Image: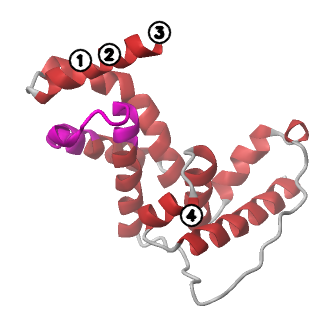
Amino acid sequence: METNIQNIHNDLVKKSKTGDRHSQYQLYELYVDAMYNVSFRMVGIKEDAEDVVQDSFIEAFKNLHTYKYQSTFGSWLKRIVINKSINHLKVKRIPITPIENHEFHLQEENIEPIEKIDLHKVKKGIETLPNGYKQIINLYLLEGYDHNEIGEILEISTSTSKSQYHRAKKKLIEIIKEL
């Protein structure tokens, strides 16, 4: 089943590469909601997320010739959306604090089992995190990037990504306990 869907999507991509506007619109319709959700989790403002998604689709269709079918179209497009979202936040000057010159010894905290945690509180907690922490949490937990990839995306070291993630997680736990 998934292969059929991938084949349909790949056919739409091939047609879109030739400039077929109908196929481009179909790809847009297939992915716009998911890409909006990705961007919104990162930028946190509805209108900004909508702008980022529109810019991302424009860039994707302009650069469709670079898509080589090595990953799914959705993951290729998602990377564009994430990069555009990060660039948007950089323009707004939302900092991530580099801490390369410090060494931290982080230990895993005891976290309540997932059944005991109210997902509504977790979502609300993520929304209230400072934007730098929110970026790391979204990229690591929700988008599934590892710390090496996050480092590349945000132009920070892997150790900074790890320490920011641990700080963000600690802050998120504090917020959830207060809710």
Q: CA distance from mark 1 to mark 3?
A: 15 Å
Q: CA distance from mark 3 to mark 2?
A: 10 Å
Image label count: 4
Numbered disc 4: secondary structure? helix
Closer to the eye: label 4 or 2: 2
Q: Which residue is mark 3?
A: 1
Q: Is residue 44 visible?
A: no
Q: Which residue corresponds to the image point at 21% horizontal and 45% vertical from the top-left?
A: 59
The amino acid type found where label 3 is placed reads Met
Of mark 1 and mark 4, the one earlier in the sequence is: 1
* Part of the protein shown in magenta: 57-78
Given contact means CB atoms under 8 Å apart, are the residues at marks 4 and 3 in contact? Answer: no
Could you say which disc has been placed on residue 7 in the image? 2
The amino acid type found where label 4 is placed reads Asn
Q: CA distance from mark 1 to mark 4?
A: 38 Å
Of mark 1 and mark 3, the one earlier in the sequence is: 3
The amino acid type found where label 2 is placed reads Asn
On the image, which quarter does residue 109 sit in? bottom right
Of mark 4 and mark 3, the one earlier in the sequence is: 3
Given contact means CB atoms under 8 Å apart, are the residues at marks 2 and 1 in contact? Answer: yes
Could you say which disc has been placed on residue 131 in the image? 4
The x and y percentages for residue 137 are 62, 56
